[in-house]
Amino acid sequence: MNNLATAQPAPADTDVMQQYLREILLSPVYQAAVETPTQPMAKLSQRLGQQVWLKREDKQPVYSFKLRGAFHKLHKVKQQSPDARVVCASAGNHAQGVALSASKLGLQATIVMPITTPEIKVAAVKALGGNVVQHGTGFDEANRFAIELATTEGAIYIPPFDDPDVIAGQGTVAKELLTQHNQLDAVFIPVGGGGLLAGMAVYIKAVLPHVKVIGVEPDDANCLQAALKAGVPVTLERVGLFADGVAVKRIGSENFKLAQQFCDEVITVSSDEICAAIKDIFDDLRAVAEPAGALALAGLKKYSQHSDCQPNQQLAAVLSGANLNFDTLRYVSERCELGEKKEAVLAVTIPEEKGSFRRFCQALGGRAITEFNYRYASDHKAHIFVGIKLRHGLQELNTVKQALQDAGYDFLDLSDDELAKLHVRHMVGGLPPRPLTEQVYQFSFPEYPGALMNFLNTLGEHQNITLFHYRNHGAATGDVLAGFEVAEHHDIAEHLNTLGYEYRLVSDNQSYRTFLTAG
């Protein structure tokens, strides 16, 4: 299976297993945390041919499982040093878990957060009683400062994941899960530093050893996969930040030892696949997960779609958190269809002549176009950036490619090109090579099959289209910006009125004149 590593389990240390099992069973986390539900995902189950369950850790008071490990650790600290002060570093969920736990236990907590932390997260930690100190531009700097602060002020440093007490607290997720559903075949667990995986894996293997434990990591933050391959924890040179809750360069040492013994497999997924999982969670449960929170479900989907996976298994994934920066939803909306292979993006060269856009659409065999970016570039040919809706995934994409090839088009498949999807799609266009007698209009397109072809059939053979931008976002209407090479407005008005779409002339718009006109 692509991007999947089968762990080579080390001999299980039964003494360690029993010690963790005892800690998990007797954990006092419910003084702060709540037992979260495990819910079925009916729509996704039907689509995958599996029985899919989601453990809803986004239902915790701080919207993340991190409260469990933090409280278990701080409870131990309170027992040993009732007047202790604690320090941690975090830009997100661990910070809120420590702040709330300290407040519940009557401890003073200082949370070191990078200066780049969004104000909403800083405010959330303060509201929970944490004393926030902002330092450094990233977690590593903040963490070093937190350790120094604990040493100089005689406080106790609370690690985010590499600690037996933190691990035991996180293991209570597995205790609940197996109580709620004891007929599972596999459990999928997100991996950042490895605390949740370690705690859940040791409990699952102690209670139901036949249940497969599968860790899930982002393709660009696969510290556990790299460690399993090397046989020891290794430090990644860099990690991707989309799933910031699991953007960890090095797996915890204690976590790695437990993963070696109790984790069966590790699978990695792309950012697009995470976006698709966020959408699946919303579609089934009307819940909005953060990227790291949807990571495990993305891995479950990838695993279940492999040919070796038996149908109708009982599969559970942990929704680990919902502390989402709202702006991230814009990116998720843009990428989820690509993650499901329900959309492809292509760069295609078409002739620069009247009707060429319409003929290109005809070559697609009636498939819906989700995006079209074009700017007149020369008198002979044009390069377009186009999105195509797919109903049958890669099989249909191969059919589209063959149709374009048969029609004589030069094209590139950009569906897996991160640079193209993140940046280039928004930069297609620019200045034409010569001044144009151009009129530019903004249209409201009704979002129904054939609306685009209706536009092209009405205008495409009569006017030379010089600029076109369209993106389908699923609303009842879509905005289109289109330019035509015409001498006067009345030359095109008759055709525009025949079209029947709402439109307005925007040729005098300052942004258009600044960025998209020559001379």
Image (cartoon, rainbow, N blue to C red):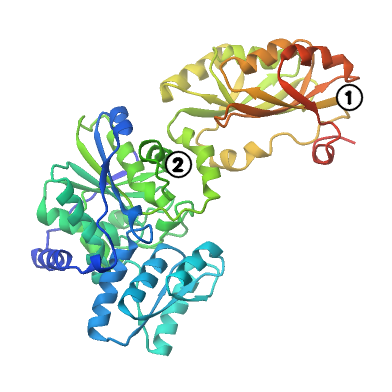
Q: Which quadrant of the rendered structure holds the C terminus?
A: top right
Residue at x-position 45% and y-position 56%:
244
Q: Quadrant of residue 363?
A: top right
Q: Position of residue 1 (x, y in %)?
A: 30, 37
Residue type indicated by callout 2: Cys
Residue annotated with mark 1: 437
Q: Are dots 2 and 1 in contact, CB under 8 Å?
A: no
Name above or below for residue 505 compared with residue 138. above
Identify the secondary structure beneath mark 2.
Answer: helix
Secondary structure beneath label 1: loop
Between 109 and 152, the one nearer to me in the picture: 109
| Residue 157 placement (x, y as % from top left) | 36, 79
Which quadrant of the view contains residue 512? Answer: top right
> How many residues crowd around disc 1 within 10 Å: few (fewer than 14), some, or many (20 or more)?
few
In front of the other: 172 or 230:
172
Depth check, front residue: 205 or 3: 205
Mark 2 closeness class: few <14, some 14–19, many ≥20 residues within 10 Å? many
The residues bearing labels 2 and 1 have C-alpha atoms spaced at a distance of 42 Å
Give the residue at x 28% y 32%: 45
Whether residue 163 is visible:
no
| Position of 139 relative to 441 (above/below) | below
User: The disc labelled 1 sits on which kind of residue?
Assistant: Thr
Whichever of callouts 2 and 1 sits on the residue coming sooner in the sequence is 2
Task: List the residue tagged with mark 2.
Answer: 275
Q: How many marks?
A: 2
Left or right: residue 470 versus residue 99 is right
Quick check: 463 above or below 239?
above
Q: Is residue 459 left or right of residue 163?
A: right
- The front one of 460 and 419 is 460
Quarter of the image where one finds residue 509: top right
Residue shown at the point (52%, 49%) measured from the top left: 328
Residue 476 placed where, x, y %? 58, 26
